[in-house]
Structures are given as C-alpha cells and as structure tokens.
C-alpha cells in the first residue's frame, strides 16, 4: 500500500500523464536482437534514463535530498566495484564506468553544497 501511494505521489509531482502501479511484473527477455545493439550504446547513462523533464537522479534529490543522494551514489559505486568482473559476458570496464559515474556525481554534488 505504501509503495502504491508513494509511486502515485511521485507520478503526480513530476506530471506523469499516464501512471499505473503494477503489483507483479513479468519481464520478457528478447535475445534475438542482442547482436544488433550498437557499440556506441551508453550503458552508464542511456537515453531511457532521460525520458522525462528531469532525470531519475534529479527526482531522487528532490524527494530525499542531496545528502541522501550522495550517500546513495557512494553505495552504488561501492556495489559496482565489489561486483566487477562477476557478470557473465560483461566487460569489467562497464562496471568501472558506472562506479566512476556515481563517484563523479557524488563529488559534483558535494562541491555544489559546499559553495
């Protein structure tokens, strides 16, 4: 119940026109087109992260505040560094890039609040 109310309030806050909470979700993986994925695809910050008027990380700052988002970034960077090299068929560099993105974002936000 809390999740539904919270998700609806987030949807309302960011002007999502059509929002639907789904209790259970079945994910279908289509493997036939995996070879068609371009090498130029941004696995760290892909375009679908930027669909709305704000990126998800910006909404998270609005909801939980910059200090908590900085902590989130630090934890995500730690997670990616701990797991790097463990994902099958995934280059270590991808996890390093993701960890660096979170570390850079935390640093950027710290510098912003310390001005």
Image: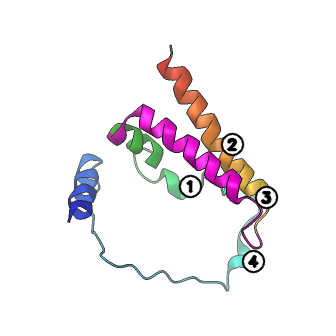
Q: Which residue bears the numbered disc 1?
A: 47
Q: Which residue bears the numbered disc 4?
A: 35
> Does 93 appear above or below 53?
below
Would residue 69 be found to the left or right of residue 34 on screen? left
Q: Earlier in the sequence, mark 1 or mark 2?
A: 1
The quarter holding residue 19 reads: bottom left
Residue 70 lies in magenta, yes or no? Answer: yes
Which residue extends farthest bottom?
32
Q: How many marks?
A: 4
Q: Earlier in the sequence, mark 4 or mark 3?
A: 4
> Does 68 appear above or below 28?
above
Quadrant where the image shows the N terminus: bottom left
How far, Cα to Cα, is label 3 from label 2? Answer: 12 Å
Q: Which residues are magenta?
A: 63-89
Label 2 crowd bin: few (<14), some (14–19), many (20+), radius 10 Å: some
Q: Which residue bears the numbered disc 2?
A: 100
Check disc 4 and report its element: helix, strand or loop.
helix
Check disc 2 and report its element: helix, strand or loop.
helix
């Amino acid at each position: 119940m809390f999740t539904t109310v919270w998700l609806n309030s987030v949807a309302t806050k960011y002007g999502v026109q059509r929002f639907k909470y789904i209790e259970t979700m079945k994910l279908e993986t289509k493997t036939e087109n995996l070879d068609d994925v371009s090498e130029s695809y941004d696995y760290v910050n892909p375009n679908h992260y930027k669909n709305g008027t704000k990126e998800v990380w910006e909404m998270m700052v609005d909801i939980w505040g910059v200090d908590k988002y900085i902590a989130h970034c630090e934890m995500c960077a730690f997670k990616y560094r701990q797991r790097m090299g463990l994902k099958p068929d995934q280059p270590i560099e991808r996890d390093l890039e993701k960890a660096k993105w979170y570390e850079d974002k935390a640093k950027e936000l710290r510098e912003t609040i310390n001005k």
